[in-house]
Amino acid sequence: MPETTISPPSPPGMPSLSELFISFIIVSVSGFGGALPWARRMIVEQKRWMTTEEFNEAFALAQFLPGPNVVNFSVVFGSRFGGAAGAAVALAGLMGPPLVIVTVLAMLYAQFGELEILGRILSGITAAAAGLLIAVVGKMALPLFTKRWTWAPVIAILAFAGVAIMRWPLPWVFAVLAPVAVAIAWFKPAAKTAN
Amino acid sequence: MNDNPLIALFGYFALLSLFAVGGANAAIPEMHRIAVEVMHWMNDRQFADSFAIAQLSPGPNVIIVTLIGYHVAGLAGAAVATVAMCGPTCLLSFFAARTWDRFKDAPWRIAIQAGLVPVSLGLIAASAFVLARAADKNIYAGVVTAVTVAVVSFTRVNPLWLFAAGGVLGLSGWL
């Protein structure tokens, strides 16, 4: 990509509805092993519709709400830029292609009952997808760990350790840590990402 | 037990979606309980196959509900299950996003936001870790993951090239 790599001051060009739709189609058809990295790549790195911090905040809201995270995110993002129509269009772009693909796969499976070759290809793609997600998490977490250290990185590390190392159920980790983190942010407002 | 499978599908998935904190993957055990143990819509093997097919497809992992719906009641079932799983939470997200943007400068909103972002980042990092642990069954797969981390972090190469390379290696039987 021959883009200049200097970090962008993000001139927030408003995406049109068709641009939203096509962008989310691209995100969904690229999204093997999860659509989040592709959503961030599109929105923060390529189109520059949001800064790193804005994306983190919008995604945190989507994750806080019940239901599938990326689906929620498409609605949160779409509504911010295009109201109800924007939300509908982003959601349709995200869900439409996978619905068709998965239905075709299900029919093939019913016909042949054997997807072994696809499975082998997928195991290779998943190994790359894991690497992509790790790299994207690194980029997302960068502002948190490069600013002056406060309680926030500690909360992030605790959330990670609870689910990844201790293997506690994600909803429980969330239910315990989220109120604690919000309470700290409330009583120590200076610690919130000052910029 | 309900006579009309479409109504049962809609009811269960609409309810599940509103309690699915942490996304689709966190809800998989509950989906299994409903589909296999409570409703007997499918057996263990069929559920595992649905999960695998959902993984094979690009896009959000929640797409597994489409397959469960399809298994229960064909295309109508697929549509109903998908709408039930996504509809209520999408409406909720829409109104939450509106409220969120309206109270952009309210202190409570700023505190919630500042608290949620690090929790969210930690949880995403955990899912990356879990995905890597599941995917990297041998040293070659681990190398694919590590190379992808490096390339995505330090270059602007489109990650689809790495997916393609991974897919070819997987097909060749190396991974």
Image (tube, coloured by chain):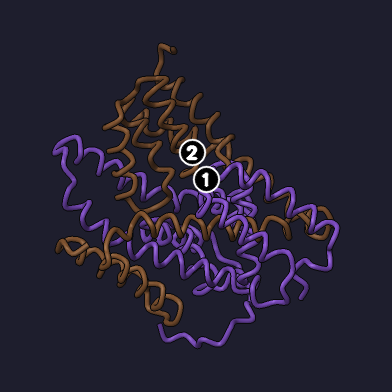
Q: CA distance from mark 1 to mark 2?
A: 7 Å
Q: Is residue B100 left or right of residue A127?
A: right
Q: Could you classify mark 2 by the number of other residues whose Cα lies within 10 Å: few (under 14), some (14-19), or many (20 or more)? A: many
Mark 1: few, some, or many residues within 10 Å (few <14, many ≥20)?
many
Q: Quadrant of residue B49?
A: top left
Residue placed under numbered mark 2 in the picture: B27
Asked where in the image residue B31 lies, by quadrant, the reply is top left
Q: Which secondary structure lies at badge 2?
A: helix
Q: Is residue A67 above or below residue B117?
A: above
The residue singled out by tag 1 in the image is B23
CB of mark 1 within 8 Å of CB of mark 2?
Answer: yes
Quadrant of image for the N terminus of chain B: top left
Point 36% across, 44% down: residue:
A99
Q: Position of residue A113 (x, y in %)?
A: 16, 37
**Badges 1 and 2, same chain:** yes
Tag 2: amino acid: Ala
Q: Which chain is purple?
A: A
Q: Residue at x 82, y 60 (%)?
A: B105
| Chain letter for the residue marked with disc 2 in the picture | B
Q: Chain of mark 1?
A: B
**Residue A38 visible (yes or no):** yes
Give the percent coordinates (x, y) of residue A156: 63, 61
Residue B151 vs B18, above or below: the answer is below
Q: Position of residue A77 (x, y in %)?
A: 59, 57
